[in-house]
Amino acid sequence: LLLQGQAGDETEEDVRPAPLAGKNADGPRGPDADSPEASRAMSPDSGAASAPAASEPEPQLKEGHLVIAENRRGISFDDLFGNYLSGAKTITVTDPYIRLFHQIRNFMELLETILRFRTSGEEIHVHLVTCVEEGKPMQQLDQLTRIQESAQELGVYVTWTFDNSGSLHARHIVTDTGWKISLDRGLDIFLPYPMNDAFSFANKMQQFRRCRAFEVTYIRLQKQGCQALYED
């Protein structure tokens, strides 16, 4: 599966399939809105229990490869990762460049996506593997600690490991539900935007930012292979 974003596209590609249309879209019609049957069905005093609202079908996640062109807008962590992170209770994020303020903010925004897509009340453990910012290590540690404390209040438990091997290069997200999302640029996919402007929509909403060129690969792991990744 190759989903390729081209500069200047009028429509956005989505790795998730569109929801299936209802089976009875062209089926028999119910009673006319003005008929007695319809009036009784809609009446709060009719004594009949209302039919439960039909739930939306769960997205069918697929393996695939996504290519995003430079300067494209309309991209967000929710669209890229949300459904693949939904249901996961343990998530490992490997990115050697969660060091500077804007990179740590990217990690914070990933946690926001995890919160939006989690099952209500579910506890989630997120482990970050990154490298120390040699220029300002205490600032990096302070910012990660503040995220940890804030997330813990919401039932998301954040931990991290600093890789000092000097060889960490891979960037990916792995879930205990068996998905690996490989990121050639890691989470640092956005071009500079006015981060200090409280009235900038690009500051508040990712889809209004311009993107760097990047690629994402969605890989379905075998359960045993997925467990091995966590044990490493």
Image (cartoon, rainbow, N blue to C red):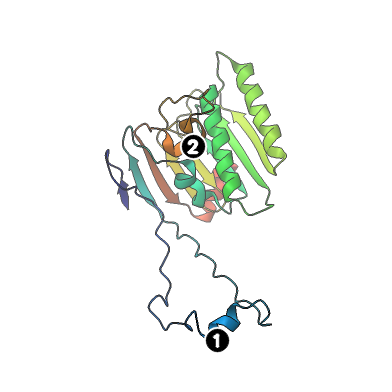
Residue closest to the eye, 13 or 159 = 13
- Please identify the quadrant where the C terminus is shown: top right
Q: Dot 2: what SS?
A: loop
Q: Is residue 213 above or below residue 135?
A: below
Say which residue appears at 50% left-offset and 41% top-offset. Answer: 173
Who's the residue at 56% across and 27% down the image?
163
Indicate which disc residue 36 carries. 1
Res. 41 in view: yes
| Residue positioned most to the top | 135
Label drawn at residue 205: 2
On the picture, is 126 further left or further right than 155?
left
Give the residue type at disc 1: Pro
Please name the residue shown 53% across and 55% down the image: 223
First-in-chain label (2 vs 1): 1
Q: Residues within 10 Å of mark 2 (few under 14, many from 20)?
A: few
Q: Nearer the viewer, residue 221 or 42?
A: 42
Q: Is residue 232 visible?
A: no
Image check: 188 left or right of 144?
A: left
Mark-to-mark CA distance, 2 and 1: 48 Å
Q: Which residue lies most toward the bottom here?
A: 36
